[in-house]
Image (cartoon, helix red, strand yellow):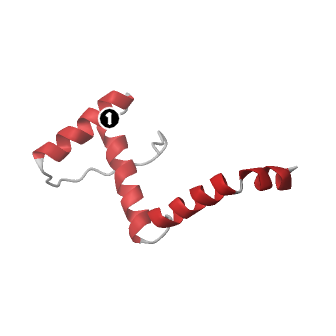
Amino acid sequence: MYHDAMTWQKFSSQARPELLEEVRALAAEEGRQFQAVLDEALAEWVAKKKGETPRPEVIGHLKASIARHRKLYQELAK
């Protein structure tokens, strides 16, 4: 969720070295800047804490329902 037009604010914090290395490695693998990956992670964490993202068990039930009723959903979509 990186947007060039965003205003960025510098801040200082600390994290475990191995966690930072993993984030840097993921950013490099994806060809993204570290700050973009960090921004995405923070946004996802905030959304999760606010309850804006579905719980994993809800997603699991949705996927099971789609698999079980795929033909019905396809017919209804016509």
**Residue at left offset 18%, top offset 46%:** 19
Residue identified by numbered label 1: 27
Pick the residue in front: 60 or 11: 60
**Residue at left offset 45%, top offset 62%:** 56
Q: Is the residue 49 above or below the residue 30 in the image?
A: below
From this viewpoint, which residue is outermost toward the right? 78
Q: What residue type is labelled 1?
A: Ala
| Residue 52 position in % (x across, y down) | 50, 67
Label 1 SS: helix
Mark count: 1
Instruction: Kindly tell me whether residue 55 is visible in this rendering.
Output: no
| Residue 38 position in % (x across, y down) | 32, 47
| Residue 39 position in % (x across, y down) | 36, 49
Q: In screen coordinates, is 36 left or right of 2?
A: left
| Residue 65 position in % (x across, y down) | 64, 60
**Residue at left offset 46%, top offset 71%:** 51
Q: Is the residue 77 above or below the residue 24 in the image?
A: below
Residue count near mark 1 (Cα–Cα under 10 Å), binned few <14, some 14–19, many ≥20: some
Pick the residue in front: 31 or 75: 75
From this viewpoint, which residue is outermost toward the left? 17
**Residue at left offset 24%, top offset 36%:** 24
Instruction: Kindly tell me whether residue 20 is visible in this rendering.
Output: yes
Q: Is the residue 41 above or below the residue 55 in the image?
A: above
From this viewpoint, which residue is outermost toward the front? 68
From this viewpoint, which residue is outermost toward the bottom? 50
